[in-house]
Amino acid sequence: MQHKGTKTIETNRLILRQFRPKDAEYMYKNWASDPKVTAYLTWPAHPNAELTKALLTDWINHYSEPSYYNWVIELKEIGEVIGNISVVELNERIEEADIGYCMGAAWWGNAIMPEALNAVITYLFEEVGANRVAACHDSNNPKSGRVMEKAGMKLEGVLRAAAVNNQGICNKVCYSILKNEWKEARGL
């Protein structure tokens, strides 16, 4: 893979870009403090904006690393950041990127996350040279799986009691898309 870091990606409705310090206020307000958003995540809802600011400072410091991919999702229509999508694990040997994402509950059900995920998959295949993009979700959160399906990912299977999140030990439902499948779906 040829790492290029977190570059700005624009879609019809979204700007995916690096976090900025001023994003902390909206990140805290729009998703990081909401227990509904974090219910199936591995980190708890933020108890205060200071924690969000400290986390963003850490993330921003990693942007100089070419293999660091962490985008804030900005909704053009309102000019606010509403979520986050990132590469949570890289496997150089098999050219794989594993994706994680979350978004404010106020925007659920509007096909925003599939749009963001599609954009990131395209970036990882076209720009970075990944061969496989994968993502997993808790079996009790099937809507996350729908996001993956809408982005063209295929169900690979369920790993029973193989993960832990804010609900405790859970089943891990895994999806992926390979570069050749992605190209074929686009007629490339």
Image (cartoon, helix red, strand yellow):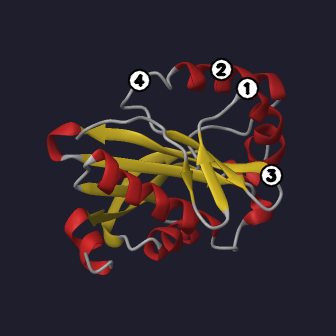
Q: What residue type is labelled 1?
A: Pro
Q: What residue type is labelled 3?
A: Gly
Q: How far apart are marks 1 and 4 (CA)?
A: 18 Å
**Above or below for 117 versus 64:** below
> Whole-percent x and y of residue 27?
76, 40
131 relative position to 9: left or right: left
The 10 Å Cα crowd at callout 2, few under 14, some 14 to 19, many 20 or more, is some
Q: Which residue occupies 59% across, 36% down?
A: 18
Q: Is residue 21 visible?
A: yes
First in sequence: mark 1 vs mark 4? 1
Tag 1, which secondary structure?
Answer: helix
Return the residue found at the far left.
93
Whether pointer 1 and pointer 2 mark residues with C-beta atoms closer than 8 Å, the reply is: yes
Q: Which mark is residue 65?
A: 4
Q: How far apart are marks 3 and 2 (CA)?
A: 21 Å
> Whole-percent x and y of residue 131?
22, 55
First in sequence: mark 3 vs mark 2? 2
Which residue does the numbered mark 1 point to in the structure image? 21
Q: Which residue occupies 74% across, 29% down?
A: 52
Out of 88 and 8, give the one closest to the viewer.
Answer: 8
Q: Distance between the residues labelled 4 and 3?
A: 27 Å
Q: Which residue occupies 36% across, 31% down?
A: 67
Q: What residue type is labelled 4?
A: Glu
